Image (cartoon, rainbow, N blue to C red):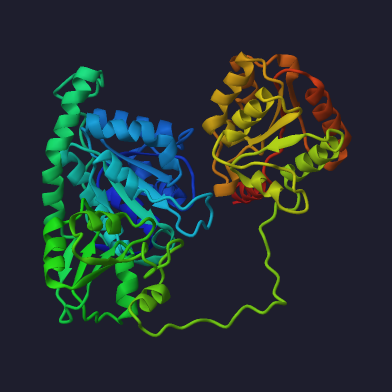
């Protein structure tokens, strides 16, 4: 055994490497990014030639991982919670095809929306797909569960969902690793039609998935990660899920007087839950995210008094923490001094010298000439254009929505409709929207603000690098309306002129202001110097 100080995401990465993965497939997104980065920098992964290149988006990551699983090898898929929306098509159907080599999907949820546009709970996807789920409560469990999840995936012939949250992902603890197992040899499915989801086959595969549900529950009942912990005070029972168990132990200094069911593997361990309900007068549920378990319990333990997020015992939104858990049990809490009014909040801002600044400065100057102009933007650093001093954008919904929303507004008669999207977001989810616009000759102006990296999540290399013009031409944008230029202050008038010309063109035009991210440029220069 070797002990290391690891973030939760790093513990998952090391567990996957030691579990014998042959590939990791992912698109960057906080708080999941460092899983893939850890593997990319791992000497073990490099020596074994583990696949570790970023995918264009979460859907392609999921599908490529399923292909590796088809070939009998172990594959890890990583994304943040909103990435599950992009990957859901393949994820739901992979539950029906099943897995050949072990396939583990890690979804990193972001309660309290530290760096996200919603507060989604990926356990709903696991329940929806009817697959086993894991939810570690600490870094050591994150390591151990990842290895276990690959074994479980192959034992049950199904993908396994690993759900973590921000606080576990980005906190450190000592983790003992074990000897790595070898990678699987290639082995193809015995049933050549297993992955062919024609209706006649899919119906049979779905029945197989339904037949496995009692087996999944039995695995949960016997899981080393689910525990029934006795307590002397039976006036209340507690179900503590994932990191909620840590908060509970902190609130009671490790000596909780009530019976506890610690849940870290799903479906729910029904035998433990039944035992708790028969012993206790009421139940409190501690879970990050949605009241998933609380709602389930109200179904099959309707006679019990169930408390949690739904009745206000715990906050309905945001992360759990030791104080709100302590308050739920009437324990004393410690609150810091109020923030003085003289301390002004500091919202995030675009870096000084960022190319997006030059784009928004020019765009704001031009759209003053068009009273009805609206700018539809997207997910990335440039979303900060919504804040002062620019206040230049009117939408930010999901990856790729800038182009399609601009098209829809133009279809409704809005002029001018302008889209601002980043280079990586364009190849992630914007290309299909551009094709729709080209097919209908929509009068929209698209600005692909190209800083040659995925800058918001740490400067990973963008799939768009070196391809943007060719993609736009290939999709059908007229070459004379693909305009590339360098966004720097001295070129301000030129950029304004280009934006104005393309707004006045009643068709699809693409402007590509290109200048490398200044943070990436500095990092690259430092690496080169070393």
Foreground residue, 300 or 12?
Answer: 300
Q: Residue at x 23, y 31 (%)?
A: 96
In which quarter of the view is residue 279 placed? bottom left
Horizontal relation, residue 512 to residue 175: left or right: right
Horizontal relation, residue 182 to residue 85: left or right: left
Residue 334 position (above or below residue 495): below
Residue 86 position (above or below residue 504): below
Residue 165, image x, y percentages: 40, 57
Residue 198 position (above or below residue 522): above
Horizontal relation, residue 42 to residue 498: left or right: left
Foreground residue, 283 or 114?
Answer: 283
Residue 226, image x, y percentages: 19, 61
Horizontal relation, residue 149 to residue 313: left or right: left
Q: Residue at x 60, y 23 (%)?
A: 434
Q: Residue at x 30, y 61 (%)?
A: 242
In which quarter of the view is residue 416 placed? top right
Query: How many numbered discs sit on the rendered protein?
Result: 0
Q: Residue furthest bottom?
A: 332
Residue 371, image x, y percentages: 83, 35
Residue 363, image x, y percentages: 79, 37
Q: Residue at x 57, y 41 (%)?
A: 397
Q: Is residue 433 visible?
A: yes
Q: Is residue 65 visible?
A: no
Is the N terminus in the top left, top right, bottom left or bottom right quadrant? bottom left
């Amino acid at each position: 055994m070797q002990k290391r100080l690891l973030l939760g995401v790093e513990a998952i990465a090391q567990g996957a490497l030691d579990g014998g993965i042959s590939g990791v497939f992912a698109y960057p997104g906080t708080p999941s990014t460092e899983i893939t980065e850890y593997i990319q920098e791992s000497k073990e992964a490099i020596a074994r030639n583990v696949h570790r290149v970023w995918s264009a988006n979460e859907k392609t990551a999921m599908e490529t991982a399923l292909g590796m699983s088809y070939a009998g090898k172990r594959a890890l898929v990583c994304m943040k919670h909103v990435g599950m929306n992009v990957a859901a098509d393949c994820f739901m159907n992979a539950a029906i095809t099943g897995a050949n080599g072990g396939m583990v999907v890690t979804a990193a949820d972001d309660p309290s929306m530290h760096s996200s546009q919603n507060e989604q709970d990926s356990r709903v996807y696991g329940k929806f797909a009817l697959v086993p789920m894991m939810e570690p409560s600490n870094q050591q469990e994150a390591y151990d569960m990842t290895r276990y999840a690959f074994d479980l995936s192959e034992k049950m012939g199904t993908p396994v969902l690993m759900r973590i949250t921000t606080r576990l992902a980005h906190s450190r603890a000592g983790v003992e690793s074990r000897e790595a197992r070898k990678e699987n040899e290639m082995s193809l499915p015995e049933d050549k039609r297993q992955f062919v989801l024609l209706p006649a086959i899919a119906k049979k595969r779905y029945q197989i998935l339904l037949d496995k549900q009692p087996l999944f529950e039995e695995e949960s009942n016997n899981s080393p990660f689910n525990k029934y912990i006795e307590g002397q005070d039976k006036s209340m029972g507690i179900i503590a899920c994932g990191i909620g168990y840590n908060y509970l132990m902190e609130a009671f200094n490790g000596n909780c007087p009530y019976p506890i069911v610690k849940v870290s593997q799903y479906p729910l361990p029904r035998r433990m839950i039944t035992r708790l309900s028969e012993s206790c007068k009421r139940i409190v549920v501690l879970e990050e995210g949605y009241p998933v378990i609380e709602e389930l319990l109200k179904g099959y333990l309707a006679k019990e008094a169930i408390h949690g997020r739904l009745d206000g015992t715990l906050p309905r939104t945001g992360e759990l923490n030791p104080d709100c858990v302590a308050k739920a049990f009437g324990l004393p809490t410690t609150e810091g001094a109020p923030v003085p009014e003289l301390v002004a909040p500091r919202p995030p801002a675009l870096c000084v010298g960022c190319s997006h600044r030059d784009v928004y400065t020019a765009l704001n100057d031009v759209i003053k000439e068009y009273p009805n102009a609206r700018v539809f933007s997207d997910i990335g650093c440039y979303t900060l254009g919504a804040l002062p001093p620019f206040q230049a954008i009117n939408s930010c919904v999901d990856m790729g929505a800038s182009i399609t929303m601009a098209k829809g507004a133009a279809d409704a008669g809005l002029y001018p409709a302008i889209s601002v999207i980043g280079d990586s977001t364009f190849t992630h989810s914007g290309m299909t929207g551009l094709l729709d616009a080209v097919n209908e000759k929509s009068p929209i102006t698209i600005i692909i603000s190209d800083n040659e990296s995925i800058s918001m999540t740490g400067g990973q290399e963008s799939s768009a690098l070196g391809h943007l013009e060719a993609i736009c031409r290939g999709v059908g944008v007229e070459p004379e309306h693909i305009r590339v230029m360098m966004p720097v202050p001295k070129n301000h008038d030129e950029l304004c002129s280009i934006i104005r010309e393309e707004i006045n063109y009643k068709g699809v035009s693409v402007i590509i202001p290109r200048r490398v991210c200044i943070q990436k440029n500095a990092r690259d220069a430092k690496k080169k110097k070393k």
